[in-house]
Image (tube, rainbow, N blue to C red):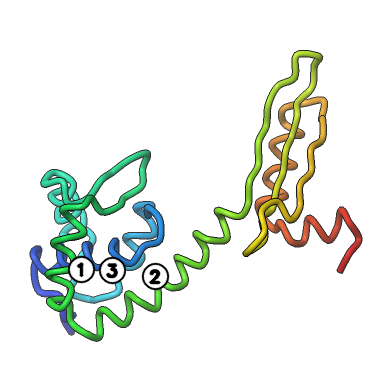
C-alpha cells in the first residue's frame, strides 16, 4: 500500500495550520477533514488527535463547531507552511479555493424566521450580490412555523432559482 507524503502527527499539525491559514472563515469539522485527508499519509484517527492537541495548545480555536486559527496558530502556521510537501499544499489550495467560494456564497444568503404577536410567522429572505448588499429581499407572513421553515429551506437550496421563480426574471 502506497503511503502519502505526510509522515507523522507533527506534519499533520503543520498541515492543519496550513489549511486553516487559507480559510476565509472558520471551517466545520467536515470541511477541515475533507481537505486534510487529501494525502494518503493522513488517517482520520491521527487527524483527530492532532486537531485536538492544536485546540488544547491554543493554536486552533473551536467555537460553535467551527475551527479557526488563533494568533498563535497563525504565527506558527506561517513559520511551518514550507514543511508541508509542495504537492500536498497544491491539493489543499485547490480544495480550499472551492471551499472558500462556497463559504462566500453562503454568507450572501440570509434568512430569518420570527413568531409574530398577532399570530403567524414572519419569514425574511435576502440574497446579497457580490458587490451590493440585499440584491433581493423578501418578507412574508406564513400561518405555520413549518411553512416558514420549508420556505427557508427552499430558498437556501437554490436562492438564484428561487428569485427567478418569484420574479419571473431570467
Q: Mark 1 against mark 3, which lies toward the viewer? A: 1
Residue 161 lies in quadrant: bottom right
Q: Is residue 91 left or right of residue 142?
A: left
Residue 149 visible? The answer is: yes
* Secondary element type, mark 1: helix
Q: Is residue 142 above or below residue 20?
A: above
Residue 77 lies in quadrant: bottom left
Residue 114: give its label. none
Residue 1 visible? The answer is: no
Could you say which is closer to the camera, residue 34 or residue 131? 131
Which callout, 3 or 2, points at the residue further toward the start of the chain?
3
Could you say which is closer to the camera, residue 77 or residue 19? 77
Q: Is residue 129 left or right of residue 11?
A: right
* Secondary element type, mark 3: loop
Residue 167 lies in quadrant: bottom right
Residue at horizontal 15%, vertical 78%? 82
Q: CA distance from mark 3 to mark 2?
A: 13 Å
Residue 37: give its label. 3
Q: Is residue 28 left or right of residue 56?
A: right
Does the CB distance between marks 3 and 2 fall below 8 Å? Answer: no
The residue positioned farthest toward the top in the image shown: 117
Tag 2 residue: 96
Q: Mark 3 against mark 2, which lies toward the viewer? A: 2
- Residue 129 place in picture, x, y as percent: 67, 60
Tag 1 residue: 15
Amino acid at each position: 500500500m502506497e503511503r502519502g507524503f505526510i509522515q507523522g502527527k507533527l506534519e499533520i499539525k503543520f498541515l492543519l495550520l496550513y489549511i486553516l491559514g487559507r480559510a476565509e472563515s472558520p471551517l466545520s469539522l467536515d470541511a477541515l477533514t475533507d481537505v486534510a485527508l487529501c494525502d494518503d499519509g493522513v488517517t482520520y484517527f491521527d487527524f483527530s488527535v492532532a486537531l485536538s492537541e492544536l485546540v488544547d495548545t491554543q493554536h486552533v480555536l473551536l467555537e460553535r463547531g467551527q475551527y479557526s486559527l488563533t494568533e498563535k496558530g497563525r504565527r506558527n502556521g506561517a513559520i511551518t507552511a514550507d514543511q508541508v510537501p509542495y504537492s500536498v499544499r497544491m491539493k489543499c489550495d485547490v480544495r480550499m479555493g472551492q471551499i472558500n467560494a462556497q463559504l462566500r456564497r453562503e454568507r450572501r444568503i440570509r434568512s430569518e424566521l420570527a413568531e409574530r404577536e398577532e399570530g403567524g410567522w414572519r419569514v425574511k429572505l435576502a440574497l446579497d450580490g457580490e458587490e451590493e448588499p440585499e440584491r433581493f429581499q423578501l418578507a412574508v407572513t406564513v400561518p405555520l412555523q413549518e411553512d416558514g421553515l420549508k420556505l427557508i429551506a427552499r430558498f437556501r437550496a437554490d436562492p438564484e432559482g428561487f428569485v427567478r421563480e418569484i420574479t419571473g426574471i431570467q
